[in-house]
Image (spheres, rainbow, N blue to C red):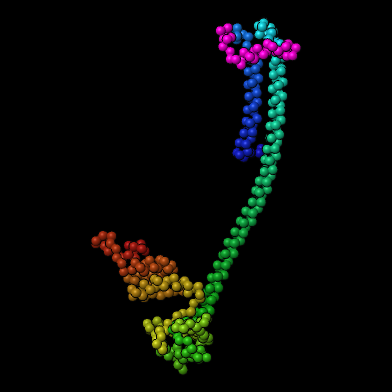
Amino acid sequence: MTKFPIILRVHLAVQLLSLFIPLFSLLSTVTYTSLSLLQPVNFMKTSPKLKNRHSPVITSNLQLRSQVSPEANPEANDRNMAEANPSFPIDYDILTAKITDVVGAIVEGKMDVINNKLDVIQATLDGNTRRLDEAETRISKVEDIIADMETRLTRVESKICTFTNRLDDQEARSRRDNLRIFGVKEGVEGANAIAYFEKWLPSLLNMKTKNGRIRLDRCHRSLGEPISGSPRAVIMKLHYPTDKREVLALSGKNKQIFFDGALITIRQDVPQNVRQQRRNFNEACQLLITKGIRFRMLFPATLRFTYENRRFSFDSAEEALKVVSAIGKRSRRNAATPIAAWEVLLGVC
């Protein structure tokens, strides 16, 4: 069974009311007329005092009826005879049949109109039902396609993440013997950068090597045009991993290294995304330097340091900054037990 929407039900009810209201009005009019035909004589005779209380309209109507000729209107003649003679017989079956015929004709006409409108409404509902069925079918197909695509997209995202991690790992492995040196003035290496820095690096760090040089596979400046007052970094690949570790160890022991009046900084070469992750720790690292706390940056981007015999390790720059900012501050739960602010943050108190 088809369920009509609420709006269509309301519309149908309004249409039916608009058709039945005139019908009810007609029925009430016919009923009133039939009663007036049957009762006027007895009413007037039972209340003689009310004869003279009729309105002018009723009086004129009665006079008009009396003037109509019997041949012109037999029904009026019968009614006049009934008024003149209360014992005049009235055939109620004929009257009822006439009223039934009139009402039946009117109702039949109205029902024809109602049936026509119902046919139109039913046709509209059938069309809407077909369209809704088609829309539901299409939506169901689209939902199935989207569900399949979401599953495939999840698999693709997982594969992309895996491939990205592998690619980053391969790039990091290809750079693990590389060093970046900052602060070396442009052009000091001349045309042969490898030959120059093979001797320059051991002499800068007082590094003991055979023949006073180390072996480099490649050496060049970083990409980009040189900027006045800001020399590009020197990127070199050492042939022996032991030489790279020794260079980093010596540069770590020497807090400040100068060459030709410029501060030289030596760092492990890492991929671009790792450098960006480490830059996020710059503020926390600066606070650690200000407070005189030594720290290390582990691969790929993990900040580690020790404070008050407790080792800290952070992969999140935000969490590291909160704890480092709280180091050195004291809070009091009570006067007898001072508590470090970083202990409150870590929940160790």
Classify the position of the N terminus by image quarter.
top right
Q: Residue furthest left?
A: 336
Residue 11 found in image quarter:
top right
Identify the residue shown where x is 40% and y is 68%: 320
Q: Is residue 26 above or below residue 268?
A: above
> Which residue appears farthest toward the bottom when viewing the image?
211
25 or 198: which is nearer to us? 25
Q: Which residues are magenta?
A: 47-76
- The image position of residue 19, as x and y in percent, is 65, 30
Q: Position of residue 252 (x, y in %)?
A: 40, 81
Q: Is residue 333 magenta?
A: no
Q: Main secondary structure of the magenta part?
A: helix
The residue lying at 34 percent from left, 74 percent from top is 290
> Relative to 207, is 16 on the left or the right?
right
Q: Position of residue 268 (x, y in %)?
A: 46, 79
Residue located at (73% from left, 11% from top): 70
Q: Position of residue 348 (x, y in %)?
A: 34, 63
Is residue 99 shown above or below 323? above
Q: Between residue 265 and residue 297, name the one nearer to us.
A: 265
Look at the image and tell me in which quarter the C terminus lies: bottom left
Residue 286 in view:
yes
Q: Is residue 66 magenta?
A: yes
Residue 127: quarter of image: top right
Q: Nearer the viewer, residue 171 or 143?
A: 143
- On the picture, is 104 further left or further right than 190? right
267 lies above or below 88: below
Which residue is at 34% across, 71% downward?
307
Kindly tell me whether residue 91 is visible in this rendering: no
